[in-house]
Image: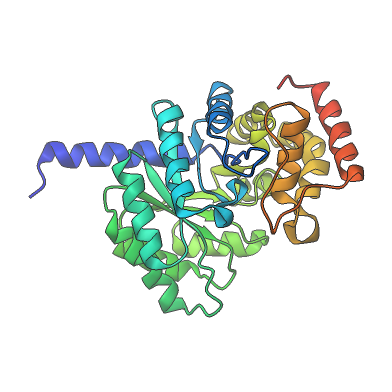
Amino acid sequence: MQSVDDTDTALAGVERARAALAGVVAIPVTPFTAQGAVDWDRHGALLRRLVDAGITAVTPNGNTGEFYTLTPAEARRAAENTIKEVGEHATVIVGVGLDTAAAIAAASHARDCGAHLVMVHQPVHPYISGEGWTEYHRTIAEAVPELGVVLYIRDARVTGEQIARLGELCPNVIGIKYSVPDPVRFASVAHDAGRERFVWLAGLAELSAPGYFVLGASGFTSGLANVAPVIAVEMHQMLAANDYRGALGIWDLIRPFEQLRAADAAADNVSVVKEALAQLGLCRRDVRPPSRTLPNGVRDHIESILANWGARWQF
């Protein structure tokens, strides 16, 4: 039987986790060496740079971290290295997914090495039923009741009623990274699931954040934060203060960069971020297939964007 002190500690941990989600959740890149291995020294340096700039939540093994190209051993080490480097100063939300057994193993590893939450990637199975979606997430969440769980939703078929039901079954499901590009759909799903029951994240990053904040989001995920964390932090501060005019000023400046990432069904999403980091001298531009390194014309465009940002921010 859980003691009163244990219950109070668990509740305090949940509240800290909810507060961390209501901010900028950076999705760090996974830098590679010239030989194609993970560059763990640079991985740590990039993480520290995020936290030093004011980022308070990070998700190793997210899509900007090329989760689907990492080996299981690399993904485990990414979680371990993140906790070692910044776990005392930021909330660590480890990405897990793939088949149910692999997701549970990764979530259990994250718990054991000191992570604060896990984010369950959208299922990649070609045939997903509503009941199966609920069962997949329930099984993972129940395996790690000590951890907060964030759902990553990219499928417009997932309903608010399904999310609400999962929340009833699993109290540790506390956050929703909503990445369906439909503000009306988002508002309806959040209403039906419970705007206050869950912390809602604008999962399509800064360009979607202003509209989604109006409709109930209180945080957003960011790949751009790898390049210019000060921009992401400043935009969130403005949105949290209901300064939408100021936030839209930032939106105008970052739109060309984010549009490059979103083009062609986000084919170059990570490549654009790593190219910018390479131009800043922070890591190599290398990505793993099926991503690609960028042609010279796109590289030149990124160079001009960084120069434009540099007139306002130091990064």
Of 258 and 161, nearer the camera is 258
Residue at (80% x, 55% y) in the render: 263
Residue at (83% x, 21% y) in the render: 311
Give the number of marks: 0
Of 182 and 270, nearer the camera is 270
Of 253 and 245, nearer the camera is 253
Left or right placement of residue 72 versus residue 64 in this view:
left
Colour option used: rainbow
Of 264 and 200, nearer the camera is 264
Left or right placement of residue 315 versus residue 53 in this view:
right
Residue at (45% x, 62% y) in the render: 193
> Residue 11 location in percent, x, y?
26, 41
Question: Going by the picture, which residue comes out furthest to the front?
Answer: 35
Q: Is residue 138 visible?
A: yes
Q: Quadrant of the C terminus?
A: top right
Q: Quadrant of residue 218?
A: top right
Above or below: residue 166 compared with residue 96: below
Q: Quadrant of residue 240?
A: top right
> Residue 46 location in percent, x, y?
59, 29
